[in-house]
Image (cartoon, grey):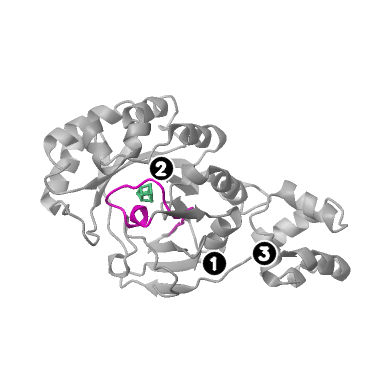
Amino acid sequence: MNESSLRPLIGLSLEQLRDVAAEVGLKPFAAKQICAWLYQRRVTDIDEMTDISKAARQRLKEKYTVGRERPLAEAVSSDGTVKYLFRGAGDRQVEAVFIPDRDRATLCVSSQAGCKMKCSFCMTGRQGYHGNLTTAQIINQVLEAGGADVLTNIVFMGMGEPTDNLDAVLAAIEILTAPWGLAWSPKRITVSTIGNIPGLKTLLDTTKVHIAISVHSPYPAERAGIMPVERAWAVRDVMELLRQYDFAHQRRLSVEYIMWRGFNDDMAHADALARLIKGTSSRVNLIRFHAIPGAEMAPSAKATMEAFRDRLNDAGVTATIRASRGEDIDAACGMLAGKQSENTI
Ligand code: SF4
């Protein structure tokens, strides 16, 4: 059997593994054993599943593989951030970024190779869309980049718009949080979205993960100029939806706001942003813009960002300036692009 025609086991749910067990003549309870090998002991080879008979393992190996894939390359930043490159979709690779920070270790994962959303400030948006990642490919990033034992948090903020590959993202969240999976609390997971309303609603109703919404401008016409999604799903309507959910207790809502000099960083913008998000119990992350090739806009000055933050705080909004990580390896927000058909970073 050709290795590439084998189907990956990682990415499958307990229920799907019951079907696999039946297919290879195993009893249904073997599905739980396979889950434990995949997601708790995290083996990389079916032959390591030693409580499954050798004959059954052989039958399993004829159709399946564990499906773990090592990163194609990695780059380490001077601040300890590590960027990993994985096989993606089509001929495109995707990136995952490991961000250690005192007692936290966060992995920023990708959900698509490229992206359809065309945000003007984002390198991933510029490369266009090349395909969805499978659930196996999303889980593989968690198991391979940094290591599931080391990680404290996962953020879906890498390449792609998670609500545009929702089935795979929801299946990955199930594996990350189910008792038969990695058994993480959903409080360790954040999904970042630009606000596709039906997808966001499904995410809100079917999971308990934290949500981050990319706003970047409180004014519709201005936002539409940098984020075409505004024409399909207005951020005002996104906020209206979010007001119907509780973000004051277990679940957190963050508003992401990249700051550009002379574009969205004056006090009128701060006041309009405070009005826009009123009643959502959200906190605002102010993000310094990382210039990308050909970008016309420049990052806001530090003092401007601090004044903007203070204005929001004075309006009763919790706002912080997010520390920038991994800039020297192009791993910061908006910089993930991937190199085309090269196994280098
Ligand atoms: S910012 Fe997010 S949604 Fe927009 S183009 Fe980049 S990856 Fe896609």
The residue that label 3 is drawn on is 41
Where disc 1 sits, the SS reads: helix
Write the start and end of the magenta stretch as one range: 107-127
Q: Residue at x 53, y 34 (%)?
A: 202
Q: Magenta span has 282?
A: no
The answer to whether residue 56 of the structure is visible from this angle is yes
The answer to whether the residues at label 1 and label 3 have Cβ atoms under 8 Å apart is no
Q: In what quadrant of the picture does the N terminus appear? A: bottom right
Separation (CA) of disc 1 from disc 3: 13 Å
Q: In what quadrant of the picture does the C terminus appear? A: bottom left
Q: Residue at x 65, y 59 (%)?
A: 10
Q: Is residue 332 left or right of residue 274?
A: right
Q: Residue at x 54, y 47 (%)?
A: 169
Where disc 3 sits, the SS reads: loop
| Type of amino acid at the residue the image marks with label 3 | Arg
302 vs 225, nearest the viewer: 225
Separation (CA) of disc 3 from disc 2: 32 Å
